[in-house]
Amino acid sequence: MPALAPQRILIAGATSAIAEAIARRFVAQSAGGAALRFLLAGRNEARLEAVAADLRVRGAAEVLCFGIDFQDLDRHQALLDQARSAWGGVDLILVAWGSLPDQAAAERDPELARRAWGENATASLAFLGRAAALLDEQGHGQLAVISSVAGDRGRRGNYLYGAAKAAVSTYLQGLRARLHPKGIAVTDLRPGPVDTPMTAHLRKGPLFCSAERAGRLAHAAILRRRDIAYIPGYWRLIMTVIRLLPEGLFKRLNLSA
Ligand SMILES: NC(=O)c1ccc[n+]([C@@H]2O[C@H](COP(=O)([O-])OP(=O)(O)OC[C@H]3O[C@@H](n4cnc5c(N)ncnc54)[C@H](OP(=O)(O)O)[C@@H]3O)[C@@H](O)[C@H]2O)c1
């Protein structure tokens, strides 16, 4: 039996521009959002409230907020417990927080590197383990996680970030195989460069896409319960070619994306 569209949605990192676009798309695509319930989690509580107010105005049935810095691993379970106690269960857990470290600075400053790894890898894996346990226990649902094309192959400008995203994607592969027999979907969303606050300092090339477009494509991939979704889809082809390049050639190329 095909799974119903998610109606109880926990967003971890809900102040992300891409996550916000996904949430808006959910509301727009579900008859004004009348049946949709959101639990929005993030560390900037004023911004979280603004995102919540916007979703309410658009018609979401219920929007709850939960203040959390995801580096505080001890708080993860309280967030998941909140979803369970508010709704009895959750249909979709979307994991969206992340940060793009300055590669060169992180090489000079191990504390910066540790924090960037902690935020993008350690905290993500810790949260995913607990989120998977909740879905496993309730026996249904979906996990969708924003990883990145940067995890597909280490490139000279962002390999700390890329290594963290590769860790997340590999972890998701294992989770997917573990949860598949229960009918729980694990969707690895892999955007190319997206124009959001995270990339505000970067020069925008032709391969950049808007947060709205990324959100629309991610929403469609979640509804189709895809395993891996490149966003936009042409990144699947680009990354297939990039992964196939022999290392001897690859190390001579200066690929920026
Ligand atoms: N933009 C791109 O080109 C691109 C490409 C591929 C993948 N991604 C991934 O997409 C996801 C969303 O990023 P975005 O592009 O939408 O950028 P964004 O708008 O800057 O969102 C990143 C969000 O992560 C939150 N965050 C970071 N560390 C956190 C922590 N420790 N605890 C709680 N929240 C934390 C930030 O909160 P604050 O506002 O409080 O800082 C911010 O809301 C990230 O995982 C990113 O790696 C982005």
Image: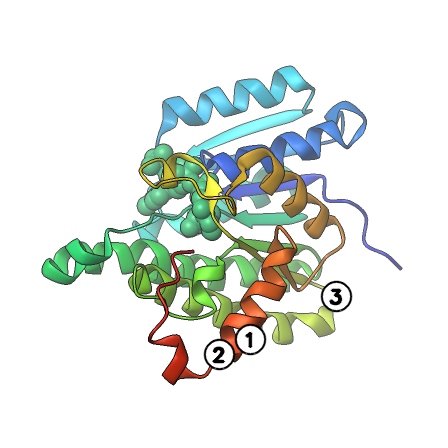
Residue 157 at x, y percent in the picture:
30, 59
First of labels 1, 3 by sequence position: 1
Does the numbered disc 3 mark a residue whose Cβ is under 8 Å from ligand 1?
A: no
The span from disc 2 to disc 3 (Cα, nearest Å) is 36 Å
Name the kind of residue labelled 3 in the image: Gly
Q: Residue at x 23, y 51 (%)?
A: 102
Q: Which residue is mark 2?
A: 245
Name the kind of residue labelled 1 in the image: Gly
Above or below, 15 against 188 in this view is above
> Dot 1, how many residues are within 10 Å of its Cα: few (below 14), some (14-19), or many (20+)?
few
> Dot 3, how many residues are within 10 Å of its Cα: few (below 14), some (14-19), or many (20+)?
some
Q: Which residue is mark 3?
A: 183
The outermost residue toward the top is 57
First of labels 1, 2 by sequence position: 1
Where the N terminus falls, by quadrant? Answer: bottom right
Q: Secondary structure at mark 3?
A: loop
First of labels 2, 3 by sequence position: 3
The span from disc 1 to disc 2 (Cα, nearest Å) is 26 Å
Quick one: 221 or 123, which is closer to the camera?
221
Residue 65 appears left or right of 159: right
Residue 158 at x, y percent in the picture:
32, 59
Residue 174 at x, y percent in the picture:
55, 75
Does the numbered disc 1 mark a residue whose Cβ is under 8 Å from ligand 1?
A: no
Q: Which residue is mark 1?
A: 174
Residue 194 visible here: yes
Name the kind of residue labelled 2 in the image: Leu
Residue 183 appears left or right of 46: right
* Rendering quadrant holding ligand 1: top left
Above or below, 71 against 159 in this view is above
